[in-house]
Image: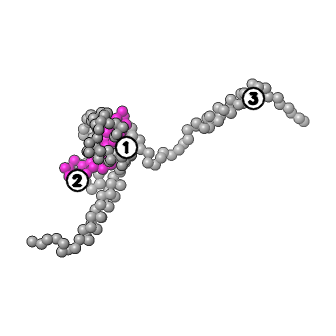
């Protein structure tokens, strides 16, 4: 038995359109990909988003900010802003695109800074609902300022610095110090 099919122009056009739609669906269909490991959400419009932003780095903060204020990022950076922006670049942020803009600064008390008896704060700069910069810093005059890196990494850095200082201390001969 022989079966012969004579497709008409309408059937060929319909089949072609169906194949084109199917191809487009396959190409543009969202893939269920795992998020990139280093990808960080910078949403900062709401209190929950700001707290979640800090939590991505491992920080626990009081839910109520210590301070909220408007901050004008200067058109031209002086030495202080240039150094602060270098800190921002270390954490994948850059304040230069926001030069001349006014943003909100949110300051939260950090509850889980390792080995710190002093008050530590998380400072966040938010522009149009997105975190554009900030730091983790102490309020002491001789304090510190670091990136948003998590407390575990910061603790490792503190431990490493202490170990290096201990090694250097051990290398100094006992008779190197003046005696009264």
Return the disc, 1 or 3, that comes first in the chain's sequence: 3
Magenta span includes 52: no
Return the disc, 2 or 3, that comes first in the chain's sequence: 3
CA distance separating discs 1 and 2: 29 Å
Residue at the disc numbered 1: 93
**Which of the two marks, 1 or 3, is nearer to us in this view?**
1
Residue placed most toward the observer, 42 or 79: 79
Return the disc, 1 or 2, that comes first in the chain's sequence: 1
- Residue depicted at 58% across the width and 37% down the height: 29
Residue placed most toward the observer, 50 or 93: 93
Q: Is residue 157 above or below residue 53?
A: below
Mark 1, secondary structure of its residue = loop
Residue at the disc numbered 2: 117
CA distance separating discs 2 and 3: 77 Å
Q: Which residues are magenta?
A: 123-147
**Residue 96 in the image: x percent, y percent?**
34, 39
**Which of the two marks, 2 or 3, is nearer to us in this view?**
3
Residue at the disc numbered 3: 12
Quarter of the figure with residue 98: top left
Task: Specify whether 89 is left or right of 29.
Answer: left
Mark 2, secondary structure of its residue = loop
**Residue 30 in the image: x percent, y percent?**
55, 38
Mark 3, secondary structure of its residue = helix
């Amino acid at each position: 038995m022989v079966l012969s099919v004579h497709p008409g122009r309408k059937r060929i056009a319909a089949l072609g359109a169906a194949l084109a739609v199917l191809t487009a669906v396959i190409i543009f269909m969202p893939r269920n990909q795992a998020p990139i490991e280093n990808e960080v959400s910078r949403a900062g419009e709401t209190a929950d988003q700001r707290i979640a932003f800090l939590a991505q780095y491992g920080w626990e903060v009081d839910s109520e900010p210590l301070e909220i204020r408007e901050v004008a990022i200067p058109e031209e950076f002086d030495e202080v802003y240039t150094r602060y922006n270098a800190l921002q670049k270390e954490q994948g942020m850059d304040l230069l695109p926001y030069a001349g803009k006014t943003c909100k600064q949110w300051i939260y008390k950090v509850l889980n800074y390792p080995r710190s008896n002093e008050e530590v704060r998380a400072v966040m700069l938010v522009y149009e609902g997105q975190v554009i910069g900030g730091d983790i810093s102490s309020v002491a005059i001789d304090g510190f300022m670091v990136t948003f890196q998590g407390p575990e990494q910061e603790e490792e850095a503190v431990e490493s610095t202490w170990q290096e200082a201990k090694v250097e201390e051990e290398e100094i001969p006992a008779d190197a110090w003046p005696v009264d």
